[in-house]
Amino acid sequence: MKEKFVVTPWEVRGAIDYGQLVKDFGVGTISEEQRKHIANAAGFEHFMLRRGIFFAQRDLGMWLKAASEGKPVALYTGRGPSGHTHLGHLMPWVFTKYLQDAFDCPLYFQMTDDEKFLFKEDLTQKQVAEYTQENVLDIIAVGFKQGKTRIFSDTQYAKTIYPLALEVAKRVTYSTAKATFGFNDSSNIGEIFFTSMQSVPCMLPTIDAREKGLIGPKEFVPVLIPHAIDQDPHFRVTRDVIDKIGYPKPASIQSKFLPSLKGGDKMSASDPDSSIYTTDSQEAAEKKINRAFTGGRATVEEQRRLGGNAEVDSICNYLTYFFEEDDKKLETRIDAYGKGEILDGENKKYLAEKVTAFLKEHQRKREAARKVVDKFVVSD
């Protein structure tokens, strides 16, 4: 009997069937026409789009239509700062930068520090604030446009956010929250309220554009939310009520999860060896890669004869999802691994070289980001 997988905003486990998830969540797949539209705007097709890593959407066509007509559009994504940033967090941000560059539009980046305090029993507000500051450096290091990127934490931007969150909260019943998120009598009341806060950035681009006179008082700025598929329940609730407040439903484009180095469909924040963090040293990253789960055989002789299983191999998955943009090189390497022409040690060495080079450059940009934080972060 196939193991039942679980995907919620706070828990992901089991062998994820993304096709089933599309049905369960009621999202649409990304069409060939939509892929071409994005690629044409960017001047190239991002490998995450081409390989189906970003695979699902809601109302993407409407957002693309508005952008093609020259209307103002915006992006919104976020981060729950409960620890250091790992590559699984970074993956959707890299794609979000691609979209910002392609459509030259503003990005609203929400740091849900309130969420992490409410949902993580072992975290204090002070710890979450420290993680927020550290995570912001990683966000800026990705290369988002200065002057067009607004980063804010919920607690530090509450004067702006809270009145809008109240409008959402007034229209979301407890029964809806309970059915969507599985809350029970032991859930704290902050958890039940939180999704109202995550809805607010969908309204901010319209409010800002009206205040600047970029659009009329009855016009709107369509918002597209790039995010991992586990966050979809929040935005289902948002879409159910936001038009009652006088704003259009946000569109979304959704990604799969960067698989774990220890095997499985998603890295675990509670297991440092399952992921590579942006703050890891070169030596630490190499050790994690060398200990990673592979699709290799018990002996070298068997692998030469039978080949490795690339589908379950975490090294091949890391190359596919993040570190090998060249399709031909990826295909050749995976084919050679499957035929036993490449062994686990060679594959690990190849990935380690790519990962350590990436970390070296990212960490350089991360340090440089300290000097420009005030150009990105806003607060009340």
Image: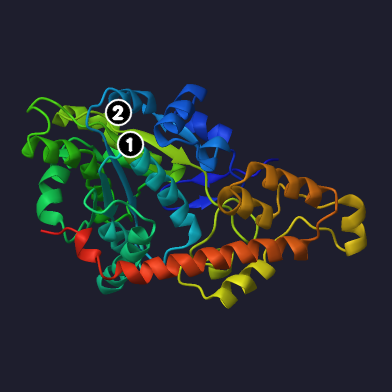
Instruction: Check the image and report above or below for 325 versus 213.
Output: below
According to the image, label 2 marks what residue? 67
Residue 305 shown left or right of residue 192 in the figure:
right
Quarter of the image with the C terminus is bottom left
Instruction: Check the image and report above or below for 51 versus 190.
Output: above
According to the image, label 1 marks what residue? 103
Disc with the residue nearer the chain's start (2 vs 1) = 2
Mark 1 residue crowding within 10 angstroms, few (<14) / some (14–19) / many (20+): many
Residue 206 shown left or right of residue 23 in the figure:
left
- Could you tell me the amino acid type at mark 1? Phe
Q: Position of residue 81 (x, y in %)?
A: 34, 62
Residue 53 shown left or right of residue 129 in the figure:
right
* Residue under the point 33% across and 69% down: 368
Furthest-front residue in this view: 43
Residue 218: name its quadrant: top left
Q: Are marks 2 and 1 in contact (CB under 8 Å)?
A: yes
Residue 63: name its quadrant: top left
